[in-house]
Amino acid sequence: MTTPASTVERGLAARARACDAASDEGLLDHPYPLDATAAEEVNPPRFIREAAKAALDRGETHYTARHGIAPLRTKLAERATRDGFPVGPEETIVTNGAAEALYVVLQTALRPGDTVFLVGPVSPQVVALATFLQLRVERLRLDQAERFPTGWDSSAGLLLVAAPSAVTGQMPAAPQLRALIDRALDAGATVVVDRSRAWCLYRDAGYGFDPSLGGRCITIGSFSTAFSMPGWRVGYVTAPGHQVSAPLELKQAMSICTSPIAQFAALAALEGADVWLAERRSFFAARRDALLRAGVPLAPADAWPAQLIDARPFGDDDIALAAQAAEARNVRVEPATRYGAELRGYLRIDLRAPRQALDAVAEFFGALAT
């Protein structure tokens, strides 16, 4: 006789297999030694590490408030408000990275069978998470506001858009983004703006986002990329007051709170952000410009470290081009169709990759052009 527990286990296993299939699609495996798609081993800057050590020495080793330490939430709320997403500290939750942030939002805003609308190319992990939660996935281009459905139950849909994109490094065009979000909100959908790369913009001129729209959106984000903190697992959710309690309850049930040591490190990151991020912007702009001078046909990007290469002049089969780069120069570049069919003919690299790998990419395109 089948027990309820075994039924649940089989259901979770089936969802996990579907999740794996979604996340593995489009991967290119090879044995070549140079990898231009991943960062070198990095540590956060010294001032962040010292803040973590100081927190440890103070004995900050127990649970914090479930939604995070007050100074960190205050800083996050100030930044969100500055960028056009007005919230207070009480509407801000510190999470275990952006992955937990997205999970608690999707899990509490939607039910199995509801639709998540993904704008533009996204990481396969996002599709895998939606698949695991048994959500329907529909992709939208930024200019397809008219395709967003109306006249449905307000709990039936969620629009997810990254600004800027972690895949392309590009910011959505402001008028089109505003039109799409406006349409989705008017339809009663939940709108989530992923701002995980907001600190990585080459020009820190602020978002200039319309607060009348931003104040009705949920935002999520992460410290991993901008502050070289991928293993520290610090992210956040901001939400209008009536939408913040459910994610907070689920976050507490899942993980109680984010590591206090990591939270104090993240607070130091924000307090030292101006100098650190200015240095990072200069560093990655220099790497980008060196590739351009070497003749690599880079697509425009508003944020680091993701960088697309427009390889369409050399053929629109990006999977074949990636294999050619691996064979010719022992370097891995990523076929961008992994992230969406609209990126066919593009390759993707990470500007944090070892310099030797980026040089090999430049040599590969130099040879193609001759």
Image (spheres, helix red, strand yellow):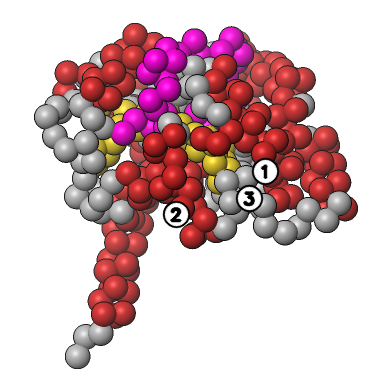
Circle 2 crowding by C-alpha within 10 Å: few under 14, some 14–19, many from 20: some
Q: Which percent across, then down, holds residue 305?
A: 57, 28
Residue 115 visible to the viewer: no
Q: Examine the image and state in which quarter residue 209 appears.
A: top left
Residue 176: say if magenta. Answer: no
Q: Which percent across, then down, holds residue 59?
A: 83, 56
Residue matched to label 2: 250
Q: Which percent across, then down, holds residue 191?
A: 34, 30
Residue 245 vs 363, above or below: the answer is below
SS class, disc 2: helix
Seen at 85% across and 41% down, the residue is: 50
Q: Amino acid at mark 2?
A: Leu
The N terminus, quarter of image: bottom left
Residue 200: say if magenta. Answer: yes
Look at the image and give the residue range highlighted in magenta: 190-218
- Front residue of 266/337: it is 266
Residue matched to label 3: 65
Residue 35 vs 66, above or below: the answer is above
Residue matched to label 1: 69
Tell me how far mark 3 sits from mark 2, CA to CA.
Answer: 14 Å
